[in-house]
Image: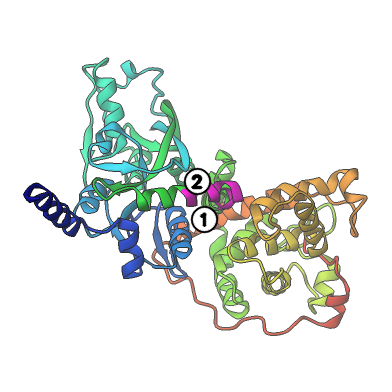
Amino acid sequence: MRVLLIMSLAALISTCSQPPPILDQVLEIGELRVVTRDSPVTYTRTPSGPSGPEFDLVQAFARELGVELVIETVDNVSEIIPRLMDGNSHMAAAGLSITESRRAFVNFGHPYTVVDMHLIYKLGTGRPRSIDEVIGRSIEIMAGSSHADILASLQTVYPGLEWVENADAEVTELLAKVADGELDFTISDSTEFDIQRHFHPDLRIALDLELGDEIAWAFPKGSGDSLLARADDFLIAASRSGKLAQVHDRYYGHTEKFDYVGTRSFIRHYKSRLPRYRAMFEEAGAIWGVDWRLLAAMGYQESHWRAQAVSPTGVRGIMMLTQDTAAFLGIDDRVDPRNSIFGGAEFYAWQTERVADTVDEPDRTWMALAAYNVGLNHVRDARRIVEWKGGNPDTWVDLSGALPLLAQRKYYSKLPYGYARGWEPVLYVNNIRSYYNILKWLTEGEDPTPPRNRLQAEPPVEIARTEEVIAS
C-alpha cells in the first residue's frame, strides 16, 4: 500500500508539473506568437500593412486555429533560435534551412519549400570556376546562417578558405556590398537573389553551393509535437489547395524571368526620363486611388516613358491608349503626357472596379492589369477555363496559366469572346510587377502619396456597353 501511495503521489506531482501541450496553450491564450526576421523573403512592414511570404502563411495558420497572430521581429537570422528558446514565442517562421546544428536546439516541421544556395559575385570581377579560385578573396556572410555551415563543410576540403560572419547585416546588404565592389563574394539563397538581382543587375551566380535546401518552420525542443503536427497538417493542405503556389507567385512570380539589359535600361530611364512625368503620375495616382509607382511601371511597359510613342497597331502616348478608349474618356490628344497618364489611370481604376468582388489583393491588381491589356471579357473567359480545370479563378497563379490557352482552338471555340493572344497579358503583368518592384526599391523611404479619392461610379454608359475597349 505504501508503494502504491508513493507511486500515486509521484504521478500526481508529475502531472501537476507538466505544462499543457503547446497547442493547448496557444488556444487558451488566443494568440500564436511567432518570431521572424525583417526581410523581403520573410516579413516586412509596408505602408499598406504587414507583408511577406512567411507572414502570409503564418497568418493563414493563425486564422485556421482561430487565434490572433502576434509577430516578433529580429534583425538577423542569428537571433532567431535564441529568441525562440527563451520561451516567449511558440514557433519561428523565418525562412530557416533545416541543418544539423539547428536540430540540436529546435524541432523542424514539414519542409514547405526548397531553395538553392549560391555564391554571388559581380559581373566583370572574374568568375571563379571552383572553390580553389575563391581562396584569398573576400567573402562575407550572415552570422548564424546556414551559409556558415556550408562554408565550414567546404573548409574541411579547402583549408585555405576563409570568410567573415557579419552579425549586423542581412543578405540584402551583403549583396549590395558585392554590387558596389566592397566585397568579392557573399552567399544568398535563390529566392533572395532572384529579388535583389533586379535592383543590382550586375550580380551573378559564381557557383551553386547547394541545391534543394529545405526550408521549414521551427519549434522549441521540449514543447511536444502538438503545434508542430497541426502546422504540418496546415502546410500539407496548403500545398494541395494551391495556397503555397499562390504565395510563391505573389512574391517571386515576377522574378523568374530576368532581363539584364532591360533592367539596366529601366534604372537609367528612371533617372533620365521619369522626372519629367513623375508629378503627373503622382497626381493621377492620388485622384484615382492607385499607387503612382504602379502607374509609372505601366507607363514604362507601354512606352518606356516616351510621350510620342506609337505602336504598329495605332495606340499612342505614354499609356498607349487606343483611339476608342481615348474617345470614351474624353481625350482629344493621346500624345499629350498629362492626357495619357490621367486617362490611363482612370481606365485602370475602372478595370480594378470591374474585377470580380471575390478577388483579393494583390491578385486583383494583376487581373486589372491583364484586363487593361487584353480586355476584361477575355480575362473572364480565362476564369472559365480555370473553373473547367478545377482551379481557383480568383488567383492570379491559376489565371496566368489559363490565359495563354485562349489562343488554342479547343478552348477559344467554346468561349463567348473567342481567340486572344493570351500569353501577352501574362508577360505584360509580369514585366510591370518587376518594374513596380524596382520603383518601390528606388523610392524606399519616400511617401508613396496616399490616394485622396477612389473611383466611386461606373464610367459613362458608352464604355460599359463596349466590353472590348482596351488600352493596348
Return the disc, 2 or 1, that comes first in the chain's sequence.
2
Side (left or right) of 168 relative to 383: left
Q: Residue at x 68, y 56 (%)?
A: 392
- State whether residue 415 appears in this view: yes
Tell me which secondary structure the magenta stretch mostly adopts: helix
Q: Are marks 2 and 1 in contact (CB under 8 Å)?
A: yes
Please name the residue that numbered disc 2 is placed on. 198
Label 2 secondary element: loop
What segment carries the magenta color? 233-246
- State whether residue 135 appears in this view: no
Name the quadrant of the C terminus.
Answer: bottom right
Q: Is residue 241 magenta?
A: yes
**Other residues around mark 1 within 10 Å, as few (<14) / some (14–19) / many (≥20):** some
In the image, 22 versus 262, the foreground residue is 22
Side (left or right) of 460 relative to 40: right
Please name the residue that numbered disc 1 is placed on. 437
In the image, 290 versus 378, the foreground residue is 378
Q: Residue at x 30, y 62 (%)?
A: 25
In the image, farthest residue toward the right: 413
**Other residues around mark 2 within 10 Å, as few (<14) / some (14–19) / many (≥20):** many
Instruction: Tell me residue 282's x, y (percent).
Output: 55, 73
Spatial CA distance of label 2 from label 1 is 9 Å
Q: For the residue marked with disc 2, what is the amino acid?
A: His
Q: For the residue marked with disc 1, what is the amino acid?
A: Asn
In the image, 459 versus 282, the foreground residue is 459
